[in-house]
Amino acid sequence: MPRAQLINANTGEILEDLGWFETALPARSVCAAHAEHLLVWERNPNGLWIAEEEDVAYQVEADLPGAGATA
């Protein structure tokens, strides 16, 4: 189950835990609703979905294989 978090982009400190989700798709949707605008997501080498803003970033854990679509 992927977890969504808002983090400080400079320090990595967790600023807000947005919760656990069945798949990464609804987790990323909640992040966009929290940001109140569309986010541009990238996959980092650690398997996290990252959407960077100015000094903060949203991060969502990737789905486990077979957990569903993440497009």
Image (cartoon, rainbow, N blue to C red):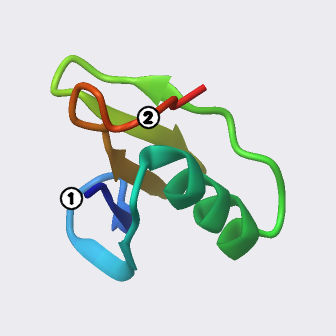
Residue located 58% across and 57% down the image: 26
Q: Is residue 25 left or right of residue 59?
A: right
Question: Would you say residue 29 is visible in this rendering?
Answer: yes
Residue located 53% across and 42% down the image: 51
The residue under label 1 is: 11
Question: Would you say residue 54 is visible in this rendering?
Answer: no
Whole-percent x and y of residue 4? Answer: 38, 63
**Residue 39 versus residue 15 in the image, above or below:** above
Q: Which numbered disc, 1 or 2, marks the residue that appears first in the sequence?
A: 1
Query: Outermost residue, top direction?
Result: 45
- Helix or strand or loop: what does disc 1 sit on? loop
Tell me the CA gap for discs 1 and 2.
Answer: 31 Å
Whole-percent x and y of residue 59? Answer: 38, 51
For badge 2, the amino acid type reads Gly
For badge 1, the amino acid type reads Thr
Q: Point out the image quarter for the N terminus.
A: bottom left
Q: Is residue 25 left or right of residue 46?
A: right
Foreground residue among 62 and 22? 22
**Residue 71 versus residue 15 in the image, above or below:** above
Image disc number at residue 68: 2
